[in-house]
Image: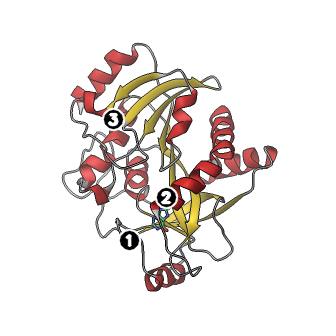
Amino acid sequence: MQSSVNYIKEKICEFQPQTGIILGSGLGGFADEFNGIVIPYSDIPKFEKSCVVGHKGQLVFAEIEGKNVVMMQGRYHFYEGYPMQTVTYPVKVMKKLGIQTLIITNAAGAVNKNFSPADLMFITDHINFMGTNPLIGENDNDLGVRFPDMSEVYSKELIEKAENTAKNLNIRTCKGVYAATTGPSYETPAEINMLRLSGADAVGMSTVPEAITAKWCGLNVLGISCLTNYAAGVKDKPLSHEEVIETANKVKDNFKSLIKNIIKII
Ligand code: HPA
């Protein structure tokens, strides 16, 4: 890990990131707004290449609203075949670079029937339906404990601040539980019914591994889902990645101003 950290530190000189942001499907364009220092994952020792459509695969370091931020433009997904260690590796590296807060964003399907595409949802809690845990294996005691508490993965304080920010901007948001599945197939209607009965409001294929890892290593976590589609079976309509990207594109202006203003106040 030290080789990744050293390489990045050499590239960013005195820049000391305080906040990290993982940009989800269709939301990566946020990082293009800033004239930041760009480091492709493929250049960083021990980083894998990221290859899903709609993801670039680079770190962008920039000052936003007076705060030093590191953005992940593209993330590693479990469904791409990467082990959990690879999926969560950048979180550990960002922690070592000195961030205190991690904002995790994603595109997700709306499971809660009161929610609809283009809603932005603050994640209050999650359900890990991925069938594995990113902390399995030898524990790095320098970063966190063997059996970390997950009672409050998503900081209530950050959610409250983010909600107030959204209100001031007149951006409608909701709050709920995010369930993570492995993908890459979307869920069946029966699976969505089960998720709803389990207490899930949204479903996606990311975020939970990174959130568990971030909480484990002592980061404050804020999770934001961009609800891009009705989950399977909610409407009589097939799901597609194109729809996910299209909806994410529609909300990107709201998303951008929300993120910028959240960064300002945390
Ligand atoms: N299911 C799983 N992942 C997703 C969805 C969905 O409906 N939409 C965006 N990511």
Q: Residues within 10 Å of mark 1 (few under 14, many from 20)?
A: some
- Are the residues at dot 2 and dot 3 in contact (C-beta closer than 8 Å)? no
Residue 211 relative to residue 89: left or right: right
Q: Secondary structure at mark 3?
A: helix
- The residue at label 1 has a CB less than 8 Å from ligand 1: no
- Which numbered mark, 2 or 3, is in the foreground of this view? 2
Q: Secondary structure at mark 2?
A: helix
Q: Callout 2, which amino acid?
A: Glu
Q: Position of residue 51 (x, y in %)?
A: 31, 46
The residue beneath circle 1 is 129
Residue 261 position, x and y percent, is 69, 37
Give above or below for 205 relative to 255.
below
Dot 2 crowding, Cα within 10 Å, few <14, some 14–19, many 20+: few
**Residue type highlighted by circle 3:** Val
Q: How is the image coloured?
A: secondary structure
> Marks 2 and 3, Cα distance to the nearest angstrom?
32 Å
| Secondary structure of residue under mark 1 | loop
Among numbered discs 1 and 2, the one appearing first in the sequence: 1
Q: Quadrant of the N terminus?
A: top left
Residue 28 seen from this side: yes
- Mark before the other along the chain sequence, 2 or 3: 3
Mark number displayed over residue 242: 2
The answer to whether 38 is drawn above or below residue 176 in the figure is above
Cα–Cα gap, marks 1 and 3: 25 Å
User: Disc 3 marks which residue?
Assistant: 93
* Type of the residue with mark 1: Phe
Residue 257 located left or right of residue 12? right
What is the C-alpha distance between the residues marked 1 and 2? Answer: 24 Å
Depth check, front residue: 200 or 212: 200
Mark 3, residues whose alpha carbon is within 10 Å: few (<14), some, or many (≥20)?
Answer: some
**Residue at image point 23% right, 50% down:** 139
Observer-side mark, 1 or 2, equals 2
